Amino acid sequence: MTEAVRVSGSLRNRLATTLIGGAAVLAILLFFVVRSYAAQIAQQGQDSILGASVTSILDAASVRDGRIEVDFPYASFSMLGTDSDDRIFYAIYQDDQLLSGYDGLPAVDPNVGGDSSYRTAEFQGTPVRLAAATRMLIGADLRTQLTVSVAQTQDSLSGTLNRISRNVAIFGTGFFLLVVLLAFWATSAAIGPLARLTTSVARRGPQDLRPVVSPVPSEMVPLVTSLNSLMARLDQSLGRSEDFIAEAAHRVRTPLATVRSHAEATLQRVDREENRQAMRAMIRAIDESSRAAGQLLDHAMITFRADHLDRQDLDLVDLVQDLAVRLGPIADMRDVDLQVDAPVAVPITGDAILLQNAIRNIVDNALKYAPRESVIHIDVTTSPSPRVTVRDEGPGFPETEIAGLSDRFARGSNADGIIGSGLGLTIAQDVAAAHGGALTLGNHPKGGACVIFSF
Amino acid sequence: MRYIFVLIAALWAQMAIAQDWEDQRLFGDAQAVQTLRILSNTDTRFFAPIIDSFLAARPDVAVTYLVTGSADLYDVFRADPADFDIVISSAMDLQFKLANDGFALAVEGTDHPTWAQWRHSLFAFSTEPAAIAVNRAAFDRVPLPASRQELIQALRARPEVFRGRIGTYDVRQSGLGYLFATQDARASETYWRLTEVMGALDAQLYCCSGAMIDDLVSGKIAVAYNVLGSYASARTDAAAQIEVILPSDFPTTMMRSAFVSRDTDQPDLGRAFIHHLTDLQSDPVRAATFPLPALDQSGQPAITLDPALMTYLDRLKRRTFLQEWESAIIQ
Ligand SMILES: Nc1ncnc2c1ncn2[C@@H]1O[C@H](COP(=O)(O)OP(=O)(O)O)[C@@H](O)[C@H]1O
């Protein structure tokens, strides 16, 4: 069983959050920068008009008969008209003495020389923008300083600013939404190769330890490289241990066969009953060992072949009937009747050697556990899927142990005194799994074990 | 002793608020719950139908309509803004200055064109040209002047007919006269030449259009310059004697305007009146049934509601202008 992987966050979420967060910060920053810039420009616009107005008034000033006249043009004020109908105020001072205009207009410190200076102040309870400038007037016997200041409320300005703010906010939001879409796209594009690698590894068969060959992004190369080398090592050590088992089984079986023939020969020659008894026990032990070795070998072979199935088009009925014929002598020896019930043909694709091995093990078991003079039913059917059902009239599986019986080396409590290694069902199960099928153990309602090998 | 004291105090108070109104009329029930005080420079007969239509749907409201000259109106109102609810005047510049100085209350929700209002507080509601009105008798067998230039020629051609018989506004007294004069001067030099000719012919100076038209009808004067066309045309009784000429060289067109006093204690009634007035005067069909000309919907008139109106109200500018005017008209 694989252990549950501990999860710490998600790359996709982390990437998306970083991108979206960054975009949000950028959008907000953009909003404030553009707005303050726009405010500055709008203010400059108002200032320049106020300045022009002040200049036009100052320029109209003259000294006539020792008296100051300021015959300023109509345009001085008309240029101050705005969409929002801003109120205007002005004052003309001669040496700090109000000549004309609004009394109490806040003072601006005008730089002498004609350049206007500006400030924001409050007049009659509303905020106003003020411009002021000063000019030296020199008459025949008069030398005086004229100061003009013009003020305007800021309704139009704030209207403009609100409009700009609204537009910038809309643009910012649009920009943000676009980046969110892009972020999702970018994250899935970035995560894509990882997901592809995951599915390609997950889709592999349990024994498929080939290296990953499809191209991967450079960042994933170290991961894939170490994955490949891990799999190579695993493959190597698996192969080595299988080789070892096969070799070991083979090496045990051959001398065992020799020992058995010697023991058989000796049995013929021995007369005393107790010696014959001992001899028979010996032969039986040798049989058991050699059978176990054989099954070990089969198991190793199956484990190996499961990865490289030699798939062919087969007829399941043929295969089962062939097997029944071959097992016929053993069945006869035990007075057991093998009854094959099959349709004309059940075509399948699979590895013939493995399937034979698996079904032989199942039928073997039935022969082992069935009582003398009984019938073993072998049914081959096509629906719901191609399957072979083997049913005997023996004691059946011990109900409580069914779940574990197909584990390696697992033997039931009813197996005492019966030759076996606990690998028969394991082999059948592995073969079924390699073919994408299943092995189902159960007991028939009328008694007897019922094993279904399905595809 | 105490009684006498109280009496003197009461009399004193009476005198303090005593004001020579040109006209003063109460519309509606004197016992009404609410009384709207309208300060105006428009002759009562021009405004009475509008007030009547306003009161028609409001039985519990009365209107006190007070009339004075435009310049006087400005001073009276500025002195006690809380004494009046509505201010109506033809002197656009003075009205504008009052609005600019914050004396007007904003009235939202009118669909008045932007060029005919300022800050949602000053509303123009009629379009009235300044006209040359002549007594037909003086132009017997002579063509009528169609422009200021032709008027100058006509006056020069027959000085004996026109000496002492030309009337125009005394711009020192009349706010509207001052507005017309400054706008004329702004538009063309012709104004100064005409003024000089009028001055040379010993022009009569009037406070108001009404008096000028009266003298024109009676034949005391033969020509009235810059008289309100609407007032002259309204004198249907004198249609045979006088002819109203709209000068073809450049028009000087004034918009009568109204606002609600900032210090009014019944702002809602004031606003309702402005709504009524603007709605009425913007609808040429309905306005046609009233003596006051409607607001010309065709667009911006020659004198626009913008800050430049305050130019000639500047003390220095006014002093310079009046000097020039006096030296032209008083010779
Ligand atoms: N036909 C059967 N009837 C009853 N029990 C069976 C049958 N086949 C298998 N078993 C039980 O399942 C166990 C595991 O079977 P198997 O893996 O083939 O090993 P064995 O070599 O012991 O038969 C057996 O020990 C036995 O208890």
Image (cartoon, coloured by chain):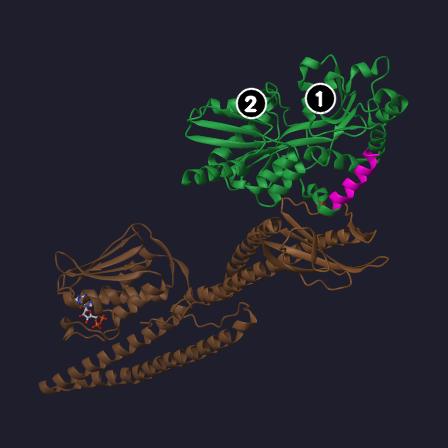
Chain colours: A brown, B green
Residue A321 location (% of width, % of height): 29, 58
Q: Of circles 1 and 2, which is in front?
A: 1
Give the main secondary structure, helix, strand or loop, of the magenta stretch.
Answer: helix
Q: What's the residue at 78%, 38% (across, down)?
A: B186
Which residue is farthest left? A273
Amino acid type, label 1 = Ile
Q: What's the residue at 24%, 65% (across, down)?
A: A362
Residue B301 location (% of width, % of height): 70, 32
Residue A47 location (% of width, % of height): 69, 56
- Residue A2: assigned label: none
Q: Chain of mark 2?
A: B
Mark found first going from the N terminus, 1 or 2:
2
Q: Is mark 1 within 8 Å of ligand 1?
A: no
Q: Which residue is mark 2?
A: B48
Which residue occupies the foreground of this view, A62 or A386? A62
Q: Which residue is mark 1?
A: B213
**In terms of secondary structure, where does tag 1 sit?**
helix
Which residue is farthest front? B1
Image region (quadrant) for ligand 1: bottom left
Residue range (magenta): B317-331
Amino acid type, label 2 = Ala
State the quadrant of the C terminus of chain B: top right
Which residue occupies the foreground of this view, B314 or A315? B314
For the residues tagged 1 and 2, is the chain the same?
yes
**In terms of secondary structure, where does tag 2 sit?**
helix
